[in-house]
Image (cartoon, helix red, strand yellow):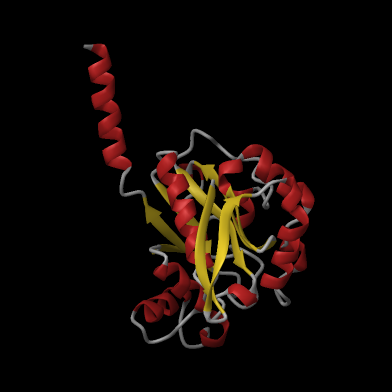
Amino acid sequence: MNKQLYVWHNGKPVKAIIRNYSERDFDGLMDAQKLSFPPPFPEELLWNKEQLVEHVSRFREGALCAEVDGRIVGSMTGLIVDMGEYGHEHSWESVTDNGYIRNHRPDGNTLYVVDICVIPEYRKTGLGKWLMQSMYETAVQLRLERLLGGGRMPGYRAKSLEATPQQYVEKVLAGEWTDPVISFLLRCGRVPVGIAQNYLEDEESLHHAVIMEWRNPFRNQLSTNQTINQQAESE
């Protein structure tokens, strides 16, 4: 993938590129993660070079970055899994192989989001939504059933005495409370389908995550077209 577009930054349009990342981008990717996830986010959960090597060698289509003026300002990584092996009560570590994605299954049904980040300087420019849209396009191209991932709930700790995780999400959906991550994913078209406990070491979320889904709207159409083509070839 190599997509050129404009985003608004400091009141003016700026050219950005969404593309697959490679070995030459590793230092920039790790710098972007450090800026995107400052403490109290656990430093050991930030990308290392060994993980990035696995990403580009096992599933390059799911390794995306956002670049502005030659600088990596955001990234998004995914892998393919069969969610029948996990269910909603899974952890980030189990479903992503602790970020190494050695459990990537090309024959799976779900594009699972390992990570998405945009450095603070480029948030609210739309780059996060463009990364997500690009990963949707990957799911469509590969004819997968859906994109799925666990969304952090960084506002939950402050409300934990007032609500369970499920109630917290319901209040965000009702517009009574706001949460930066859940709200961002909703604007990207993702839909909550469950809550995972002990998903990730994340004090702000009290280690919970909202499992949020995007269904491939072209899945049935692609399957139908494939069947028609196969029938035509056999005649």
Indicate whether 180 appears above or below 136.
Answer: below
Q: Residue at x 31, y 45 (%)?
A: 218
Kindly tell me whether residue 91 is visible in this rendering.
no
Give the quadrant of residue 177: bottom left
**Residue 54 x, y percent position in the rendering:** 70, 43
Residue 1, visible in the rendered structure = yes
Q: Quadrant of residue 188?
A: bottom left
Q: Looking at this rendering, what residue extends furthest in the top direction?
A: 235
User: Quadrant of the image for the C terminus?
Assistant: top left
In the rendered view, does 218 fall on the left or right side of 158? left
Q: Left or right: 41 with respect to 5?
A: right
Q: How many marks?
A: 0
Determine the residue positioned at 77% across, 63% down. 44
Residue 59 position within the rendered picture, expressed as x and y whole percent measured from the top left: 60, 40
Viewer-proximal residue among 226 and 113: 226
**Residue at the (27%, 26%) spot, across then down:** 227
